[in-house]
Image (spheres, rainbow, N blue to C red):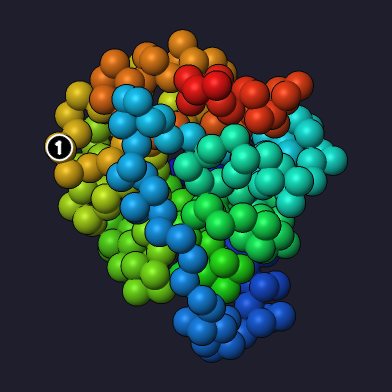
Amino acid sequence: MGIDGFLKQVVEIKSRELARAVFGIPLKTMRREAEEAVPKASFLKAMKKSRPDDIGIIAEIKKASPSKGNIRPDLDPALFAGYYTKAGARAISVLTESEFFKGSLKDLEIVCNATDLPVLRKDFIIDAYQIYEAKRAGASSVLLITTLLSRDQLKDYILLARELGMEPLVEITSEKEFEIAYYCDAKVVDINNRNLQTLKTDLTVSKRIAAILPDDIIPVEASGISSFKDIENGMSFRIFNFLVGESIVKAKDTIAFIKELRNVE
């Protein structure tokens, strides 16, 4: 994988957390409960709806971040899920990583029970067990980060997510990573403007990668989006879905801000 810096640290922490989780609920039990969980709203169908006059916002439940520290540590997941639903968000992303983002699987379960929108588990997935956890909690999608996974892992995890009734969101940060994601049959790709090794943001990343995407790929732009101007910039290169976290949770009027991003009243 060749990971370094922040990502290396995260993977070490995740590996320890995973060992504890499997000790608490064995894989066989987790798999069975995931397979028995009732399928939720389709993430893929939701992403396909978006167009220039119907912008898709994936609104995020984000309490903290490694680059900014605490953002809104007291955020009520159920309350904000209600705001996001009322504001017309296309889907909801829930950060479940605890060390740096202060999220949890409990947050994911709460949001899944509070909305009919598709819900994405956003975390650093390094094992199939975490995909079962997501489905068991009620998620419609799970983030798979190309940088973190081998080609075989990515392909297997995409297939597993679909077998469980979820459509994964596959994160890419370069043209090379898109080639890998496309080879592995990704349908929805998250073009992250933030380099996860250095945590630096570059808004030109989405423009560069969007230019090479075939028509059968649905792009989502993430990181650095804080205004409708940023949305317009993404739409200029045919991106109509946007994952927005920090600027939404920091907004004084959450519903009004999401509507502003969607360019509706």
Foreground residue among 73 and 91 = 91
In the rendered view, does 42 fall on the left or right side of 200?
left
Residue drawn at the location 76% of the way across and 21% of the way down? 252
Assign the C terminus to one quadrant of the image: top right
Is there any visible trace of residue 246 in the rendered image?
no
Q: Residue furthest top?
A: 229
The quarter holding residue 164 reads bottom left
Foreground residue among 9 and 37 = 37
How far from the left and from the top, in percent, is residue 122?
Answer: 55, 50
Residue drawn at the location 53% of the way across and 62% of the way down? 139
Residue drawn at the location 39% of the way across and 15% of the way down? 232
Residue topped by disc 1: 214
Total marks placed: 1
How far from the left and from the top, in percent, is residue 89?
Answer: 53, 39
In the rendered view, does 112 fall on the left or right side of 68?
left
Residue drawn at the location 46% of the way across and 60% of the way down? 41
Q: From the viewer's perspective, is residue 96 above or below residue 21?
A: above
Is there any visible trace of residue 21 in the rendered image?
yes
Q: From the viewer's perspective, is residue 65 above or below residue 151?
A: above
Foreground residue among 174 and 44 = 44
How far from the left and from the top, in percent, is residue 62?
Answer: 67, 39
In the rendered view, does 35 fall on the left or right side of 80?
left
Q: Residue furthest right?
A: 74
How far from the left and from the top, in percent, is residue 44?
Answer: 35, 53
**Which amino acid is tagged 1?**
Pro
